[in-house]
């Protein structure tokens, strides 16, 4: 037993999350363990793997899906709307929205909203499968600044129409869903 300990054979490599020992055993002890799928070696044991980052069309934070995207999209959509609010609140709410830690959201552009509309069926499926909420059949604020006559744009998720909103009408409430441009 002291021989095994002297040469680093101290790990039992059994229990939840373990796939077994790596290499040769000495007295049923190993120098390294292998972890089962979904587990990682951390702090001297096999622990449940916690995903942080992008895996395919999903963004994870601490193992939870926080955003989804359609394959041809270059941005991710938050799992739920932030509600209906005026333009200033929409912008600040998206800038303060945390996808994960310091990773903040943005108010989507007009083009991003149109891409969301074009991919709405797939996005809604991905959102629902991953415990999110579907895009509402409502109008959404964009971050896109328009012409002098129309200062901001909104996009309807029910028909894809784009409307310009005059500055004095930015107190009108429309829906808001943050997006994430990069991880």
Image: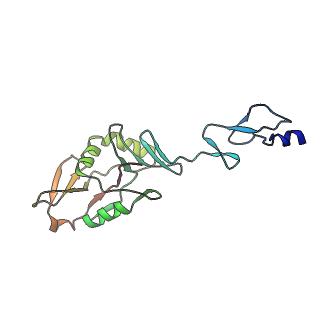
Whole-percent x and y of residue 25? 81, 33
Up-down: is 162 above or below 31? below
Instruction: Please report the residue visible at 13 percent of the width from the left and 59 percent of the height from the top.
Output: 150
Count of picture labels? 0
Is 122 displayed left or right of 18 in the figure? left
Is 150 displayed left or right of 138 in the figure? left
Quadrant assignment for the N terminus: top right
Instruction: Please report the residue visible at 26 percent of the width from the left and 41 percent of the height from the top.
Output: 118
Is 183 displayed left or right of 167 in the figure? right
Q: Is residue 148 visible?
A: yes
Q: Nearer the viewer, residue 50 or 32?
A: 32
Q: Nearer the viewer, residue 8 or 116?
A: 8
Whole-percent x and y of residue 41? 66, 44
Q: Is residue 86 visible?
A: no
Up-down: is 178 above or below 19? below
Q: Nearer the viewer, residue 48 or 156?
A: 48
Whole-percent x and y of residue 79? 40, 51
Whole-percent x and y of residue 177? 33, 55
Single out the residue that lies furthest toward the front.
Answer: 7
Q: Nearer the viewer, residue 98 or 84?
A: 98
Location of residue 57 (image quadrant): top left
Single out the residue that lies furthest toward the top.
Answer: 24
Colouring chosen for the image of the structure:
rainbow
């Amino acid at each position: 037993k002291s021989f095994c300990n002297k040469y680093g054979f101290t790990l039992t490599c059994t229990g939840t999350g373990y796939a077994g020992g790596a290499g040769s055993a000495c007295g049923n002890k190993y120098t390294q363990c292998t972890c089962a799928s979904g587990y990682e070696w951390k702090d001297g044991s096999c622990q449940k793997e916690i995903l942080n980052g992008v895996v395919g069309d999903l963004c994870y934070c601490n193992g939870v899906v926080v955003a989804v995207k359609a394959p041809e999209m270059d941005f991710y959509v938050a799992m739920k709307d932030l509600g209906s609010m005026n333009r200033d609140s929409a912008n600040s709410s998206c800038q303060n929205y945390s996808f994960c830690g310091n990773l903040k959201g943005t108010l989507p552009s007009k083009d991003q909203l149109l891409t969301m509309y074009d991919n709405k069926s797939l996005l809604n499926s991905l959102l629902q499968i991953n415990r999110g909420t579907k895009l509402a059949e409502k109008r959404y604020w964009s971050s896109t600044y328009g012409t002098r006559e129309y200062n901001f744009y909104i996009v309807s998720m029910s028909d894809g129409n784009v409307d310009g909103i005059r500055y004095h009408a930015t107190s009108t409430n429309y829906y808001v869903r943050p997006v994430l441009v990069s991880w």
